[in-house]
Amino acid sequence: MNGSKSNDNLTLCFVMAIIAVNTRLLISGRVDGISRFAVETLRRIVKAHPEHTFYFLFDRRFSDEFIFSSNVKPLVIWPQARHPLLFRFWFEKRIPIVLKKIKADVFVSPDGFLSLASDVKQLAVIHDLNFEHFPQYLPNHIANYYRRYFPLFAHKASKIATVSAFSKQDICERYHVKEDKIDVVYNGVSNIFTPISAEMKLQIQRQYSQQTPYFIYAGTLHPRKNMVNLMKAFDGFKTKTLLPHKLLLVGNKMWWTKEMQQAYNEMKHKHDVIFMGVVSDSEMAHLMASAEAMVYVSFFEGFGIPVIEAQSCDVPVICANTTSLPEVAADSAILVHPNNAEEIAQAMQSVLEENTKNTLIEKGRENVLRFSWNKTAALFWESIEKTLHV
């Protein structure tokens, strides 16, 4: 690693650095949430900084789609780390050896997991602390691991990046971390999320919603996402308005609970709920752009990317008035209390009114200008540079 003094006297300017990145969540066909952040930022960063060498550390065979540039060197580190015992082995035994062997200047971890056993400078991206607030929504062994180790990761980190001012404050208060250690690096929105023609909308509705207008939810079908009240609200909306609208739930049913199943079973209009499962990125963009509105009423979010994806498609948004969502949506969405199904149902009715809908679309267009993956990548790179110079 070579360096020279910078003129602005802020930092040492590295001519070439060896940057190791935890890329174990980059799995073909399974890019969402944290891995979406990693893909969108790393793709831009490695191309923008050919002077540096990036080692991508995978825990399984990788897809070439993630080797974004010639300055990326992939390494597969055995074993696959998908259980707390293997988390510890991978990060505490295997990673320190690799970092030492490649002479890494910094270890960057987009999923927040660090190596407590390594002395290499480390940057953790801690997206949120949902596991601290809602540990009951995770398997016990996972929740226990997160709650034991993430405080240690937060203090071990040379720097931390997170995706909202809300999450920054949460990390500071919960883990007693100084504010100047944490950078806010907002998420972005892909340019595939864009308005489509009325003709295309009708085609999508013919294909997916029985030629009927629909509300959309996008994300894992998880209790933290407030699926019970969403279904109750939709049922109330249907009963009150007698409108033909459907509800499309787009996402994995991996966290489907008995309570969620009971709420669905008790719906009068369950036949108007369409479970889409996991769809491709292009399919998701078309489904989003063809919706009447996005309903995103999670109990807890570190950011809430679907809010700005919908707004990029000129689709009005209803979202919860809690955690990061008011920060991300500002005044461009109808904010509702996530525990009040009647309030959510009323918002679903209000968002269909022409004046309200047009106002939300216009405000959404302005709001989404605050976010882009180019901005995210630039800010993330600044955090990496700061970590190099700590």
Image (tube, rainbow, N blue to C red):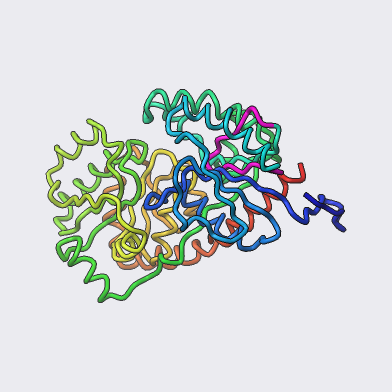
**Residue at the spot 26% in from the left edge and 38% down from the top edge:** 228
Does any portion of residue 235 appear in the rendered image? yes
**Residue at the spot 74% in from the left edge and 54% down from the top edge:** 16
Q: Is residue 256 above or below residue 328?
A: above
Q: Which residues are magenta?
A: 104-118
User: Front-most of 302 and 390?
Assistant: 390
Q: Position of residue 246 (x, y in %)?
A: 20, 56
Secondary structure mostly taken by the magenta-highlighted segment of the chain: loop
Q: Is residue 390 above or below residue 329?
A: above
**Residue at the spot 38% in from the left edge and 67% down from the top edge:** 314
Is 227 left or right of 52, judged from the image as shown?
A: left
Q: Position of residue 129 (x, y in %)?
A: 50, 34
Quadrant in which the C terminus is drawn:
top right
The image quarter containing residue 4 is: bottom right
**Residue at the spot 59% in from the left edge and 38% down from the top edge:** 169
Is 218 left or right of 65, judged from the image as shown?
A: left
Is 62 left or right of 253, judged from the image as shown?
A: right
Does any portion of residue 363 appear in the rendered image? no
Q: Position of residue 137 (x, y in %)?
A: 37, 30
The image quarter containing residue 266 is: top left
Q: Position of residue 285 (x, y in %)?
A: 35, 63
